[in-house]
Image (cartoon, rainbow, N blue to C red):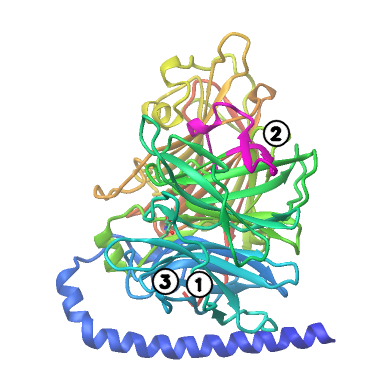
């Protein structure tokens, strides 16, 4: 009874907030129209990106710019999601923490921004940060504040909910003792940001702040500094960073435990150390704008992390080999899983973003866990997204001869979910792997794209394709002959070079190797297609690639879906199932 009562109140609160937001939004639009529309229309050329390319089920606000996910957390039955947001336009700037809530990670209701510049230590910006659940169940948010104009001098602040009995956590209070961490002892104050979720062991809290360490010969080293505290109030830096590598600035570090070898269950960030617990350290490399991680061991007495693979720091593993940055995980106690959020920027032009009035989405939240090999993570869309599946079509046992393709008809596929299992009868005809490209998936895919005939593959999907297939985005595999005694090498690519007839778009080819043994003949692919998003999971989540594409013909009902084979060997589509995807509640967008 008590629980039901609280739920009812919470929903009433949400409905009231939505109505208020709509009223406020309406008056804001009128105000903007009166003041700005003429000037804006004169200054901004019309967008070449069709409004129908706005994603339907990927997280987004009704308008404006968004970037990093911040402080995802679960509280009293609600998922909370905060994100970097510009309330005044579709380019980065004026950053506040926007706030949305959800029961299921898929349907979202926008609340008022949670954290905005309001105190001396954040008056020039409220940048990224994380949430920590304190032992009494109170969530604490740590975030980076910019405290002076001109230079972005960075300090770390804390905020607490004003009212812990409000499941929607609508108001956040910044104690007067902020900032709680300032750059000292030689730290570069303009490269010192994005505190992680804190973890507790032996009566002490620890958290990481992303930074750079003094350059030792070659360029700046990315570094994750450890701060420790007994009371969550006074924090002291451990002299040596938890870890560092010669990569340039580490933004948005993330550090968390995972169950060793193959157990899908997630672990709380403060889980007591156990022999079968491994650790993941992820950093967002400012220079490359990609998220890299390693799997390794954490020694909490020495406050050091050591990657298992000594070459791991050479940027080998990425969460996603496409457009995916500044990601953050959280432990979901309701379903005992670790969930990953990541930001996907646009790949149109800034002028397009200004003209369309919005920029940026979040990838579908993904469950992450350690692969049975222990060498890398596996990722899969949270199961709640399956609830959006509607009308479906299934194909079985269809052989694609060399050069053949097969259209999937009977449903709209501009907003769809596709799962396909391929079978290759033999890998004997696989092409040799150029040793010069053996470690560079992106160059390999650039050189041998979806239309370059191979031995085994390229085979995969053409998505968001026009009826004449002049427009198509290829997501595919290509198999290479192994070096003596090794298993065949599988490459997964997203080739958007034909995704749009519009020549003015950024169309990067993305690719990653897939750690799978294709000699057993089978490999799977799942693609979440969402108007201008293609988010794909190869071999059950071994390799993931998110691309943003903006077709000019393959829009709405005109978007088609095909399976194709451009190799010299037959490939069987043993099973393909595609679903139309419904649009969830999406912040009123
Ligand atoms: N975005 C935030 C920073 C972070 C960067 C500012 C990463 O805190 O380092 O919007 O995208």
Q: Look at the numbered disc 3 and say if its residue's Cβ is closer than 8 Å to ligand 1.
A: no
Q: Are marks 1 and 3 in contact (CB under 8 Å)?
A: yes
Q: Are marks 2 and 3 in contact (CB under 8 Å)?
A: no
Residue mark closest to the camera, 1 vs 2 = 1
Mark 1 and mark 3 lie on one chain; the one further toward the N terminus is: 3
Crowd band around label 3 with a 10 angstrom C-alpha radius: few (<14), some (14–19), many (20+):
many
Residue mark closest to the camera, 1 vs 3 = 1
x then y, percent, for residue 25: 41, 85
Mark identifier at residue 178: 1
Instruction: Please give the residue where the numbered disc 2 appears in the rendered image.
Output: 374
Camera-side residue: 155 or 159? 155
Q: Is residue 227 left or right of residue 67?
A: right
Mark 2 and mark 3 lie on one chain; the one further toward the N terminus is: 3
Camera-side residue: 480 or 173? 173
In the image, residue 506 sits, relative to residue 53, either above or below, namely above
x then y, percent, for residue 291: 49, 45
Mark identifier at residue 122: 3
| Residue drawn at 52 percent across, 43 percent down | 320
Mark 1 to mark 2 CA distance (whole Å) = 41 Å
x then y, percent, for residue 104: 66, 68
**Secondary structure found at label 2:** loop
Quadrant field for ligand 1: bottom left
| Residue drawn at 50 percent across, 72 percent down | 178
Q: Is residue 505 left or right of residue 296?
A: left
């Amino acid at each position: 009874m008590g629980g039901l009562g609280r739920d009812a109140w919470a929903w009433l609160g949400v409905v009231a907030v939505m109505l208020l937001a709509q009223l406020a939004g309406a008056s804001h639009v009128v105000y903007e129209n009166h003041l700005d529309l003429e000037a804006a229309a004169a200054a901004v050329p019309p967008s070449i990106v069709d409004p129908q390319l706005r994603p339907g089920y990927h997280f987004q606000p009704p308008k404006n710019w968004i970037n990093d996910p911040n402080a995802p957390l679960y509280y009293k039955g609600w998922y909370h999601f905060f994100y970097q947001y510009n309330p005044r336009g579709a380019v980065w700037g004026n950053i506040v923490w926007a706030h949305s809530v959800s029961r299921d990670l898929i349907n979202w209701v926008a609340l008022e921004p949670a954290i905005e510049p309001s105190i001396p230590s954040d008056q020039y910006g409220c940048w990224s940060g994380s949430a920590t659940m304190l032992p009494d169940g109170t969530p604490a948010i740590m975030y980076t504040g910019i405290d002076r104009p001109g230079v972005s001098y960075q300090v770390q602040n804390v905020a607490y909910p004003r009212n812990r009995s409000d499941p929607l956590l609508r108001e956040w209070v910044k104690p007067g003792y902020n900032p709680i961490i300032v750059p000292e002892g030689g730290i570069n104050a303009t490269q010192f940001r994005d505190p992680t979720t804190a973890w507790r062991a032996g009566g002490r809290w620890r958290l990481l702040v992303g930074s750079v360490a003094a350059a030792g010969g070659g360029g700046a080293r990315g570094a994750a500094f450890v701060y420790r505290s007994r009371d969550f109030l006074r924090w002291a830096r451990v002299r040596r960073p938890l870890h560092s590598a010669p990569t340039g600035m580490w933004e948005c570090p993330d550090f968390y435990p995972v169950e060793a070898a193959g157990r899908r269950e997630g672990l709380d960030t403060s889980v007591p150390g156990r022999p079968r617990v491994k650790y993941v350290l992820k950093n967002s490399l400012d220079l490359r704008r990609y998220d890299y991680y390693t799997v390794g061991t954490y020694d909490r007495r020495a406050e050091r992390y050591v990657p298992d693979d000594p070459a791991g720091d050479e940027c080998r593993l990425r969460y996603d080999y496409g457009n995916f940055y500044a990601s953050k995980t959280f432990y979901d106690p309701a379903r005992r899983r670790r969930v990953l959020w990541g930001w996907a920027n646009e790949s149109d032009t800034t002028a397009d973003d200004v003209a369309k009035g919005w920029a940026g989405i979040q990838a579908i939240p993904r469950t992450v866990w350690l692969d049975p090999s222990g060498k890398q993570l596996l990722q899969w869309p949270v199961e709640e997204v399956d609830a959006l599946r509607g009308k479906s079509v299934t194909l079985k046992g269809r052989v694609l001869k060399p050069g053949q393709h097969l259209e999937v008809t009977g449903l709209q596929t501009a907003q769809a979910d596709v799962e396909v299992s391929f079978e290759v009868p033999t890998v004997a005809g696989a092409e040799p792997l150029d040793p010069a490209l053996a470690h560079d998936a992106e160059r390999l895919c650039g050189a041998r794209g979806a239309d370059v005939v191979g031995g085994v593959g390229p085979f995969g999907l053409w998505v968001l394709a026009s009826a004449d297939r002049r427009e198509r985005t290829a997501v595919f595999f290509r198999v290479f002959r192994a070096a003596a005694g090794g298993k065949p090498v599988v490459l997964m690519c997203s080739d958007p070079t034909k995704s749009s007839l519009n020549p003015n778009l950024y169309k990067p080819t993305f690719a990653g190797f897939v750690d799978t043994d294709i000699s057993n003949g089978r490999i799977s692919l799942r693609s979440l297609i969402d108007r201008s998003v293609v988010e794909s999971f190869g071999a059950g989540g071994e390799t993931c690639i998110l691309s943003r594409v903006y077709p000019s013909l393959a829009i709405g009902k005109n978007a088609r879906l095909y399976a194709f084979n451009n190799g010299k060997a037959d490939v069987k589509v043993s099973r393909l199932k595609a679903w139309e995807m419904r649009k969830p509640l999406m912040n009123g967008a």
